[in-house]
Amino acid sequence: MKTPKNDVYTVSRLNGEVRQLLEGQLGRIWLNAEISNFAAPGSGHWYLTLKDNFSQIRCAMFKGRNQAVTFRPTNGQQVLVKGNISVYEPRGDYQLIIESMLPAGDGLLAQQYEALKMKLAAEGLFATDTKRPLPANIQKIGVVTSPTGAAIRDILHVLARRDSSIEVIIYPTPVQGTDAAKSICDAINLANTRAEVDVLLVTRGGGSLEDLWSFNDEGLAHTIYNSGIPVVSAVGHEVDMTISDYVADLRAPTPSAGAELLSKDADNKAQKLLSQLSRLKQAWQHYQLKKQSQVQTVEHRLQKQDPQRRLQMYEQTFDEMQLRLQQAMQTKLHAHTLKQQNLSNRLANQSPQHRLTLEAQRLNYLSAKLNDAMDDKLKMSEQRLAHRAQQLETVSPLATLSRGYSITLSADGKVVQSPSDTCIGDTLTTRLRDGSVTSTVVEVS
């Protein structure tokens, strides 16, 4: 979009024009991602963030849309969503306005199926005017299916009952599994190369979406479209619709119905009626796809001008302010709670009871320490006393006496060291190890 050089924008105008550019260029998209920051305020709207390992985007899903969601989203859940890229103008953030939400595992195949169906319809592969009529006189039918499945048995039974002259050539192929689509394409191409049948019946019995997924392959769709031999698709049951049903020249609701379409009864009226009914259903389905695409285009154009979008933006602003207020209140409450806990702890630390408890603990500690010191002092004194006693024992006269020596004392208790210390007639006492002897001096020499 070109603007004059001197055109000065306001922020509001800039955000508004960016929103229109994004909505006009990208439109509706599918997104597979993980939920985080999920919030569901009282307004009934949902706000969340979708993220992968590297990026994230804010999203809003308004009440009219989220009421159709069959599960309650949770943080960490992998989901598949469809929505429109927009800009939340008050904040200048680009966001995704979600229209539908599915669990990723359940919705991925359905989303891929719808996307491929719309793509091939836009390319003209489903156009009614490209459908080829079936041959008037069918003599050989090529059946592309599993040779061991129930479908081939039902087809052979119907053909034998209605027209046993029709020859059947089976082009065996797996109809389920990773490589089944390629094998089916190879079988169709082989039939075209050999050019030995009048019509091809591509078929299998019923099953789940995963079981029938081989028939929703883009390569198979182009192979059927480019086939030189008319192709009838008879996959699953009446309610099952696959890409091969849309692109084939004729669709039969079941394998048995396909055999009836390709065989003649007595007057051929039933076969014509079934063929016309099948073509009518196919034309109606193509018409529905075309109108669905037109409705989506008009709906997208209408959404850009819809006053409800402006109302939703105001509601989103209100919800955001409410969530921010709740968060601020919770933060404030948490801060006051921490402050109260801190004051309570400080008060408890200053409490007399707390101080008494601490002093009692300190007294017990000091008492135990004093007892330990007294025990240590007593032990040290005992050790010193034992040491002194041993030293005293070493120098004691008694120790000398115990070795066979004796001490002689005079009457006044003095030790007699020399004969000159005595006189004849003195009484002497001799101290021995275990007693004493009293004697009288009769001679001094």
Image (cartoon, grey):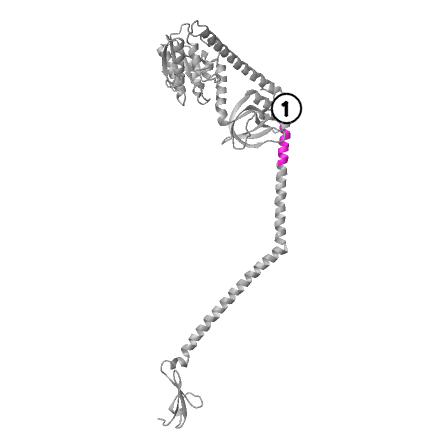
Kindly indicate the quadrant of the structure image that contains residue 171.
top left
Q: In which quarter of the image is residue 389?
A: bottom left
Which residue is pictured at 56% across the width and 17% down the height?
A: 296
Image quadrant containing the C terminus: bottom left
Most extreme residue toward the top is 267
Name the residue located 61 percent from the left edge and 56 percent from the top edge.
Answer: 355
Front one among 91 and 284: 284
167 part of magenta stretch: no
Q: Position of residue 299 (x, y in %)?
A: 58, 18
| Residue type indicated by callout 1 | Arg
x and y, in percent, of residue 188 in the image: 39, 14
Q: Name the residue under label 1.
A: 310
Q: In this view, does 140 lie above or below 296?
A: above
For the record, the magenta segment spans 316-326
Give the structural element (helix, strand or loop) at label 1: helix
Of helix, strand and loop, which mostly describes the magenta segment?
helix
Residue 390 versus residue 213 in the image, above or below: below
**Quarter containing the N terminus:** top right
| Horizontal and vertical percent position of residue 250 | 45, 11
> How dense is the environment of label 1, judged by Cα within 10 Å: few (below 14), some, or many (20 and up)?
few
Q: Is 93 left, or right, of 223 in this rendering?
A: right
Question: Is residue 137 toward the left or the right of residue 38 in the image?
Answer: left
**Camera-side residue: 12 or 354?**
354
- Does residue 225 appear in the picture of this structure? no
Instruction: State the image quarter where residue 434 is shown.
Output: bottom left
Q: Is residue 271 above or below residue 83?
A: above
Q: In this view, does 23 lie to the left or right of 264?
A: right
Q: Tell me residue 38's x, y (percent).
A: 57, 32
Query: Which residue is nearer to you in this view: 126 or 141?
Result: 141
Q: Can residue 392 be seen in this view?
A: yes
